[in-house]
């Protein structure tokens, strides 16, 4: 009898413990304290127009109950999104535990004022905590409503620009501007602030009309502020048409045998003939080399480094001009066509090459068809190019003065004889160097416009 009594007692105690365990588990489940998860992207600092947001919320225990998205500005609170999730199944086992959505906030449609606005996302789950209201997750993101675009206007007048030539605009941009410049069709040319504290907002922008521009281009000033607002402003300009010369170049087998060894670094299919190798060099390698030049535009100094008329190679004859359209023939058959993007100057072999103006060395190396090449940055997007050199006498990053000897002419690269290939770039776009050798052109098109800065 004593054993039965003990057994019953143990069973009763076991049942009580089991009930207590189950009750504790039940209470822990329905009163769980883990807050829902919220992931909101993006998190912009400014609202300048309609902004789309991606939102992911989750609660893997009791499931999602309520989602509320709103914006607050001053005493106003505007509901953007509200959603209630149904309770399904035992302990909400079939409820929603993860939800993805997208929503937009348009400051104009919501009639938001300029200035600070707070975005709030609130999520509750089906926990019985907090008096049955559930666990609450809240995130707030502060933004600034700014829908007013920056102001921009040209100060210089009468912009006459040659096809393949350079133009200069002096303009003023409002203080909230973070980036500005000028577009020629879809090609962007950045502007540069003058750097003087008293002239805040005054900028200069050198631009080019590419040699292959077919029709009258669309040219306009452009500005962007911190919020991403954009402004465009027109100004008077006129493009002068220019006819470029044509040149027939006969490629002989003797020339091919002489220049191809220089390009031993290129990998050619062994089945290619010499003329086919030449064409790959003249087309594909040329394109790669021009990309190197274009990418150097980011190395420019924001300050103007040059001064006065630019220097031309001494006692040199012009062998080829800028924009010349070259037709290549081999054994009487036309095999290629390219445009010459500089001026070829020939003097005595290994003639001294002077820096065309004050600048800083931003490139010195062998560069495919251009051979031994050096590039000087003259600030504010202007750069000069010296190619086919036999020797370079300045170091990378070195500052040089106009007239300083920087190298010797040569015939490296795709050169038919000793000469200097000289070019000028505006933000990576090659333009006609002849303009910059002309003191009258510089005075009329650059210096007089820069004088505006002294008057402001």
Image (spheres, rainbow, N blue to C red):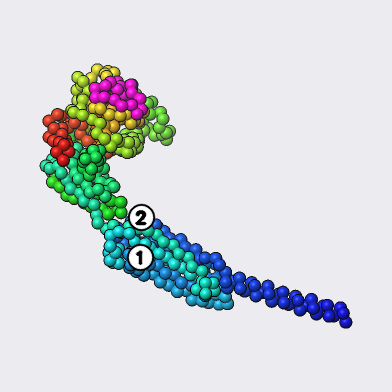
Q: Which residues are magenta?
A: 387-412
Q: Are marks 2 and 1 in contact (CB under 8 Å)?
A: no
Work out whether residue 438 can be spotted: yes
Q: Residues within 10 Å of mark 2 (few under 14, many from 20)?
A: some
Nearer the observer, 202 or 372? 202
Choose mark 2 or mark 1, whichever is in front.
1
**Residue at 73% in and 77% down:** 15
**Secondary element at image label 2:** loop
**Residue at 24% in and 34% down:** 304
**Secondary element at image label 1:** strand
397 in the magenta segment:
yes
Q: Quadrant of the C terminus?
A: top left
Q: Report which residue position mark 1 lands on.
A: 72
Depicted 449 relative to depicted 234: above or below: above
**Residue at 25% in and 38% down:** 195
Q: Report which residue position mark 2 lands on.
A: 45
108 in the magenta segment:
no
Residue 97 placed where, x, y %?
51, 69
Q: Quadrant of residue 140?
A: bottom left
Residue 413 placed where, x, y %?
33, 27
Q: Quadrant of the N terminus?
A: bottom right
Q: Residues within 10 Å of mark 1 (few under 14, many from 20)?
A: some
Depicted 243 relative to depicted 118: above or below: above
Residue 380 placed where, x, y %?
26, 37
Nearer the observer, 62 or 6? 6
Nearer the observer, 22 or 433? 22
Depicted 425 relative to depicted 410: above or below: below
On the picture, is 218 further left or further right than 352? left
Residue 139 placed where, x, y %?
44, 62
**Upstream in sequence: badge 2 or badge 1:** 2
Count of marks, rendered view: 2
On the picture, is 250 further left or further right than 449? right
């Amino acid at each position: 009898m004593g054993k039965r009594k003990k057994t019953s007692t143990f069973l009763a105690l076991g049942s009580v413990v089991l009930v207590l365990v189950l009750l504790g588990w039940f209470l822990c489940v329905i009163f769980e304290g883990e807050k829902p998860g919220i992931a909101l992207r993006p998190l912009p600092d400014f609202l300048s127009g309609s902004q789309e947001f991606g939102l992911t919320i989750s609660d893997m225990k009791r499931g999602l109950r309520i989602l509320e998205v709103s914006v607050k500005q001053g005493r106003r609170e505007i509901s953007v999104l509200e959603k209630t999730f149904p309770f399904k199944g035992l302990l909400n086992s079939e409820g929603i535990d993860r939800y993805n959505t997208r929503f937009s906030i348009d400051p104009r449609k919501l009639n938001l004022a300029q200035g600070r606005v707070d975005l709030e996302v609130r999520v509750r789950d089906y926990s019985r905590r907090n008096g049955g209201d559930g666990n609450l997750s809240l995130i707030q993101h502060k933004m600034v409503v700014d829908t007013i675009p920056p102001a921009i206007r040209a100060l210089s007048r009468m912009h006459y620009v040659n096809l393949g030539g350079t133009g200069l605009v002096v303009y003023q941009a409002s203080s909230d501007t973070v980036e500005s410049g000028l577009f020629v069709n879809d090609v962007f040319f950045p502007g540069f602030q003058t750097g003087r504290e008293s002239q805040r907002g005054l900028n200069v922008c050198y631009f080019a009309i590419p040699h292959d521009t077919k029709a009258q281009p669309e040219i306009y000033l452009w500005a962007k502020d911190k919020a991403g607002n954009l402004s465009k402003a027109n100004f008077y300009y006129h493009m002068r048409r220019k006819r470029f010369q044509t040149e027939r170049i006969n490629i002989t087998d003797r020339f091919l045998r002489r220049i191809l060894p220089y390009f031993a670094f290129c990998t050619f299919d062994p089945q290619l003939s010499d003329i086919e190798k030449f064409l790959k060099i003249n087309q594909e390698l040329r394109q790669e080399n021009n990309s190197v030049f274009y990418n150097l535009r980011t190395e420019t100094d924001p300050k103007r480094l040059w001064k006065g008329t630019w220097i031309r190679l001494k006692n040199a004859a012009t062998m080829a001009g800028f924009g010349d359209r070259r037709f290549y023939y081999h054994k009487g058959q036309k095999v290629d066509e390219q445009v010459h993007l500089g001026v070829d100057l020939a003097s005595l072999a290994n003639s001294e090459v002077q820096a065309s103006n004050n600048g800083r060395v931003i490139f010195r190396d062998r560069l495919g068809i251009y051979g031994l090449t050096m590039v000087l940055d003259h600030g504010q997007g202007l750069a000069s190019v010296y190619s086919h050199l036999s020797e370079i006498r300045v170091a990378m990053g070195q500052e040089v003065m106009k007239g300083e000897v920087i190298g010797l002419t040569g015939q490296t690269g795709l050169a038919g004889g000793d000469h200097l290939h000289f070019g000028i770039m505006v933000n990576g776009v090659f333009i006609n160097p002849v303009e910059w050798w002309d003191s009258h052109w510089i005075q009329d098109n650059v210096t007089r416009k820069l004088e505006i800065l002294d008057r402001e």
